[in-house]
Image: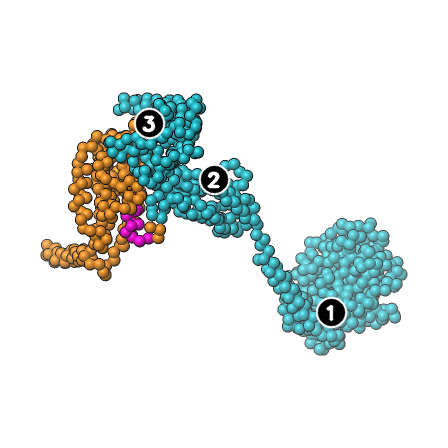
Chain colours: A orange, B cyan
Amino acid sequence: LPGRLKISPLFVALVCLAFCSRLSRMKAASICTNSQTGCHFLSLANLFDRVIHHSARMHGISNDLHSEFELYFLPSKNRVSRNCHTSTILTPNGKENAQRIAREELTEVILKLLLAWRDPLWHFHQNMARHHKFNNLSSNKSLEMSEMVHELRKGVQKVAEKMQMLGIISNSLGTLGSREALLASDSPEWRLMNDYNLLYCFRRDSNKIQNYLKILKCRIVPEHGC
Amino acid sequence: MTVSLSSIILLVLLNSALDWLPTPGFAFLMDHDQRSSSATLEPHFTDCISRDQVTFRCWWSPGRLHNLSSPGTLSVFYLKKDSPTSEWKECPEYIHENRECFFDANHTSIWTPYCVQLRGQNITYFNEDDCFTVENIVRPDPPVSLNWTLLNISPSGLSYDVLVNWEPPPSADVSVGWMRIEYEVQYRERNATNWETLEKQPHTQQTIYGLQIGKEYEVHIRSRMQAFVKFGEFSDSIFFEVTEIPSNDSTVPFTLVLTFGIVGVLMVAMLIVISRQQRLMMILLPPVPTPKIKGIDSELLKKGKLEELNFILNGGGGDGLPAYATDFYQEEPWVEFIEVDEEDVEGEDKEDNYNSDTQKLLGLPHRTTEGCSTISYPDDDSGQASSDNTNLPAHDSQMLIASLLPGQPEDNEDTVDTPASETGERPLIQTQIRGPQTWVNTDLYAQVSNVMPSGGVVLSPGQQPKIQDNTSSSESKTQKGEKKNEDKEGIEEQTKNEPRFQMLVVIPEGSEYSAESDAIQTSTPPSSPVPGSGYQTIQPQPMETKPAAMPDTNQSPYILPESPQSQLFAPVADYTVVQELDTHHSLLLNPPPSQSPSLCQPQHPLKAPMPVGYVTPDLLGNLTP
């Protein structure tokens, strides 16, 4: 017991040291976020590249799952006339439209879409896993898809924050996006969708997200060819 | 679970069955193959394609049954389902010559479902499958500006790698990122039928590995939207070929350098040899080791300093050597000295005098004949020798008998004397004539281990040491062709005065015998008592070649036939004596048993066998007639 008593203060000191260093680092990080100089930041272009790469991967997975569904499950003849629950979200329909609307609006659309798909994809994956409708590979893809939506949304939020910080876009972004997105996600429409429709809709929306991010980057980060 | 599974299977089968039926209208969302197979009679759309995801076009066909091919009889209507209240609208832009309906950017909405239909005067031709979204009908244009560069050629020179690069289609807005295109490269040999397909990848260059030299290749590329299905058309093919590159450049200088190097080295070597620089010569052409006689300097002999040699051989230096030699070698049974009987020599007639040392050394013909006769097989009578004598004088220089036998003079003197009665005066034969028994125990050649000052030669190892005051026997070891001439010469000169050794050398050169004298001895230490270590023994083995081969049985111009019993006693020899040469000039190590005493006859050169000794050049001159 006396030995333990001797050791414990040393142990406590070490623990404190470790934690304090972490705290200092975190503080440094927080300080860094507020200041614009002297910290090693990922550049906005780099951030954009990351989220764009992420969205491309997400779209690829959604395409794979949709193709599998088309292969193994009969698509309804009336497949095109289905309604997606995200139809309520106004999105630019073409390249010119996407280039014309405001950057904040475009960013907002992206965030809305991502938020709208968070829950439905999660439930979709749960549904697939529970009923063993997919093989293991596809089941892993559905899980990955739902996670990616989540991560991508966070990533785009980071990009938006950085843009706001840099003064590229105004600060009116945050609240609007979340409200509408919540509305969309709460709508029961997506629960009525069958699996195939859900995959079809998400495939379309992930393509939208990917294209919007590309155009957004081209508009914000000056690059060759934009 | 099972119900759903079975229902799914049923539905799948039903769907597949439906696919085989010709479908009314047309669903251009299907692949081209299906589209062509479902060609119908009604007016229908053949295809709708977007190249840049901004505009799209649709083509229709009037069908076969109805005569609606004239323009204006059919109109295109489309429905854009971007709102619940959307309506069918007519094609914004007709291109009648192509039967095409073009939708420009204002009328194109991506991610929006479109449906198109054909309308006649009163009939609407609509297929539900003719609905699509624009992003799904995008077929990008093929890439442009295909180019290729040679990357490398394999070390074997048989295959090479090529880097193909191109530009994205100009219609696709890749820079903005509106379209992300991946490319599929295909290549084949010029006249092949099957294309090799490489994996799709989004970069504008690709490496093709493992193309073969000398073959022409064709490459084309098509593009596709990433994560979409439809490919565009293939680009125009490019052709390229890589022929063999002559690699002489690298080898020609190499061969030149090699040749010049060799020539230079050879020239340097020649210069060295010609200039006879002693040291360089020693390095380049090391001298052949030669046997040495104790007390005799080969260099002296070369220079013709025979006096010293004579002095040495004659026992120069007084009694030192003999006396000591006598004491020294008394105990050595193997040391043998060739006895030379001075009186007999001097008592000889002129002929004998002529057969002085040199002659003796060389082996005078008549002497040798006499000796030969005695030297011949013990079985042979000595009487034969006399008959041979007459023949010899004419060829006195031709035949030499190597007769260096360490014999056992004490033992066989009696027997020896009788056959040797005729040749008693000849010191040559003395030792030889000891008789067969002596021959049994004696070697034809013995190694001179030491030269006594008195001129006697100490033989080793041998039989009883024969030590005589007045004589010294020297034996020279005859080595077949090993030592030639120069040393012999001096010795023979010296032995003119004293009958030292006597060697009968028969050389089957042409028709004559050339005399060889072998005066060189390897100086084996006398203390080597191993019998036979320095002796040459003639193995008494039956000759293979025949005397029959010889015209004269008397021929056998070699030395000693030994009786077979000698094998038991014959020590192992360092040297083997070539007894004879047969008609085929093959060496016979043992004389034919039935050799006649005419072995000394020099006029039969062919049978002349082996050179048992050395002949010096001047002696050679003497020998050759």
Say which of marks 1 and 3 sits in front: 3
Residue A127 lies in the magenta-colored region: no
- Extent of the magenta region: A211-223
* Residue type at numbered disc 1: Asp
Q: Earlier in the sequence, mark 3 or mark 2?
A: 3
- Contact, mark 1 vs mark 3 (Cβ under 8 Å): no
Measure the C-alpha gap from mark 3 to mark 2: 38 Å
Q: Is mark 1 on a helix, strand or loop?
A: helix
Q: Is residue B286 or residue A8 the one in the foreground?
A: A8
Q: In this view, does B480 lie to the left or right of B99?
A: right
Q: Mark 3 lies on which chain?
A: B
Q: Majority secondary structure of the magenta segment?
A: helix
Q: Where is residue B259 in the image (x, y as percent from the top left)?
A: 63, 61
Q: Name the residue under label 1.
A: B487
* Residue type at numbered disc 3: Glu
Measure the C-alpha gap from mark 1 to mark 2: 87 Å
Q: Which chain carries label 2?
A: B
Q: Name the residue under label 2.
A: B196
Q: Name the residue under label 3.
A: B128
Say which of marks 3 and 2 sits in front: 3
Question: Seen from this angle, which residue lies furthest bottom?
Answer: B318
Q: Quadrant of the N terminus of chain B?
A: top left
Measure the C-alpha gap from mark 1 to mark 3: 124 Å
Question: Seen from this angle, which residue lies furthest right?
Answer: B390
Task: Determine if marks 1 and 2 fall on one subunit.
Answer: yes
- Contact, mark 3 vs mark 2 (Cβ under 8 Å): no
Total marks placed: 3
Q: Position of residue B474 (x, y in %)?
A: 73, 68
Q: Where is residue A146 in the image (x, y as percent from the top left)?
A: 24, 39
